């Protein structure tokens, strides 16, 4: 049976970007016939699990020129959109819909309930209040242009027609194939935001050790292109994780994929402290703690377990007293502290984010409206585009911003 239901706008994808776009259209122009089509039985699944179940909605960074620096892909294109709808506008939108967001010390923003269900409830309530229809278990198998818009072919020979379409399917291959069928070239998706697998004996017994701040440099490939990041880090059973590592994985995502995730990681466990500064601290300890065992006394905030492992790495006996530290051992300790080289041999998965680098080419999209430059009436929002941010609320902000811009432009166009 061929069911031709007529809509003004069909939004494909029931995630954050899809819901926000549908709501933006319907709230801006009452009476607009909008439907969200979601292939799975559930909607807003990534919202549910993000931020450890708290939902990292956005980041407390209100200057667009600074905000865009958190996007390995999409920095230039997002400047204009963030001036129109950035973090401040997101905070205001959720406040208007009954949700107060709070900022943590690192700038990440969560609902004050600390529950992602609060965000889900707000979006679903807004969807219903705006009169947006939701259809789950509705897979769009193909899409075609018609004289009045688009025909979306569904399962079991059903179809529906819409004047306009918003594609907000994230990194799902089906959504990318729909875009490709309408003339769009794709940038092959690769993982972003992942941990590093490191087979280094030094790390094996240190799982669970965390650091408030390290400096890390990643070198990939024969050209030895490098990236630098600072921030918290964690030693895991398989290697290293934490914000500094995840940011490195995002900025080097494509190059790491090309090299089968083989790279060299150089770690400064002392953060911003330079080699000369660390050497001075060690020399001072040699003077002040001359008769004390090195394993029992040191000038850093490291745990005893980590410090003893570091001494072993530098081939310094733990029962050696500071006065016996010779220049060769001093240099080895400085290098272990500030320039330890670790071989990355693979990637883990940052399971709460599922972010990819890749998608629809940015040059094929008008970022004033989020409309395709190749297919009039087709709009994009969220991760379906070749845009991705680092962890901290930046990927959700990209979704809110693109969805709102698409919604405003469609409401004006329909009006």
Image (tube, rainbow, N blue to C red):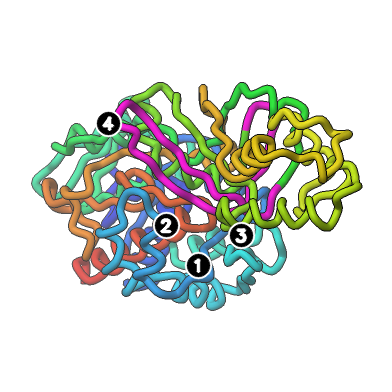
- SS for dot 2: helix
Look at the image and tell me whether residue 226 can be seen: yes
Q: Indicate the quadrant containing the C terminus: top left, top right, bottom left or bottom right.
A: bottom left
Pointer 2 or 4: first along the chain: 2
Give me the C-alpha separation between circle 2 and circle 1.
34 Å
Quarter where residue 174 is shown: top left
Instruction: Estimate how packed mark 1 is, as few (under 14), some (14 to 19) or many (20 or more) residues with alpha carbons within 10 Å.
Output: few
Pointer 2 or 1: first along the chain: 2
Give me the C-alpha separation between circle 2 and circle 3.
28 Å
Image coordinates for residue 45, horizontal then vertical, percent = 56, 44
Instruction: Estimate how packed mark 3 is, as few (under 14), some (14 to 19) or many (20 or more) residues with alpha carbons within 10 Å.
Output: few
Which is nearer the eye, 146 or 186?
186
Is 53 on the left or on the right of 70, as rendered?
Answer: right
Residue assigned mark 3: 121
Residue assigned mark 1: 129
For the residues labelled 2 and 3, say whether their Cβ atoms are less than 8 Å apart: no
Give the number of the disc on residue 177.
Answer: 4
| Stretch of the chain drawn in magenta | 211-239
Q: Please name which of the two marks, 3 or 1, marks the residue nearer to the observer.
A: 3
């Amino acid at each position: 049976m061929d069911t031709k239901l007529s809509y003004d706008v069909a939004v494909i994808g029931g995630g954050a970007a899809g819901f926000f776009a549908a709501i933006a259209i319907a709230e801006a122009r009452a009476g607009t016939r909008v439907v969200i089509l979601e292939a799975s039985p559930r909607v807003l699944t990534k919202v549910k699990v993000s931020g450890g179940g708290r939902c990292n909605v956005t980041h407390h960074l209100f200057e667009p020129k600074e905000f865009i620096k958190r996007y390995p892909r999409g920095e230039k294109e997002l400047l204009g959109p963030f001036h129109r709808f950035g973090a401040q506008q997101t905070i205001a939108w959720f406040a208007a819909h009954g949700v107060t967001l709070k900022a943590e010390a690192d700038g990440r923003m969560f609902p004050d309930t600390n529950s992602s269900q609060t965000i889900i409830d707000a979006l679903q309530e807004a969807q219903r209040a705006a009169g947006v229809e939701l259809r789950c278990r509705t897979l769009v198998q193909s899409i075609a242009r018609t004289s009045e818009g688009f025909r979306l072919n569904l399962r079991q020979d059903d179809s529906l027609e819409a004047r306009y379409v918003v594609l907000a399917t994230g990194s799902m291959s089906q959504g990318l194939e729909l875009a490709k069928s309408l003339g769009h070239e794709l940038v092959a998706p690769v993982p972003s935001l992942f941990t590093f697998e490191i087979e280094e004996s030094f790390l094996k017994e240190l799982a669970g050790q965390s650091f408030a701040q390290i400096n890390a440099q990643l070198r990939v490939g024969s050209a030895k292109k490098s990236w630098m990041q600072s921030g918290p880090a964690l030693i895991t059973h398989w290697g290293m994780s934490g914000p500094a590592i995840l940011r490195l994985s995002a900025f080097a995502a494509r190059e790491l994929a090309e090299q089968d995730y083989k790279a060299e990681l150089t770690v400064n466990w002392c953060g911003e402290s330079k080699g000369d500064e660390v050497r001075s601290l060690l020399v001072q300890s040699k003077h002040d703690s001359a008769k004390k065992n090195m394993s029992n006394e040191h000038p850093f905030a490291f745990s005893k377990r980590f410090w003893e492992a570091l001494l072993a790495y530098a081939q310094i006996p733990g029962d050696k007293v500071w006065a016996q530290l010779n220049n060769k051992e001093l240099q080895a300790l400085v290098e272990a502290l500030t320039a330890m080289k670790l071989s990355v041999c693979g990637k883990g998965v940052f399971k709460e984010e599922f972010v990819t680098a890749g998608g629809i080419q940015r040059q094929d999209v008008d970022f004033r409206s989020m409309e395709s430059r190749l297919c009039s009436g087709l709009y994009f929002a969220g991760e379906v585009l070749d845009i991705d941010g680092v962890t901290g609320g930046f990927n959700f902000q990209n979704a809110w911003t693109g969805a709102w811009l698409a919604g405003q432009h469609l409401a004006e166009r329909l009006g």
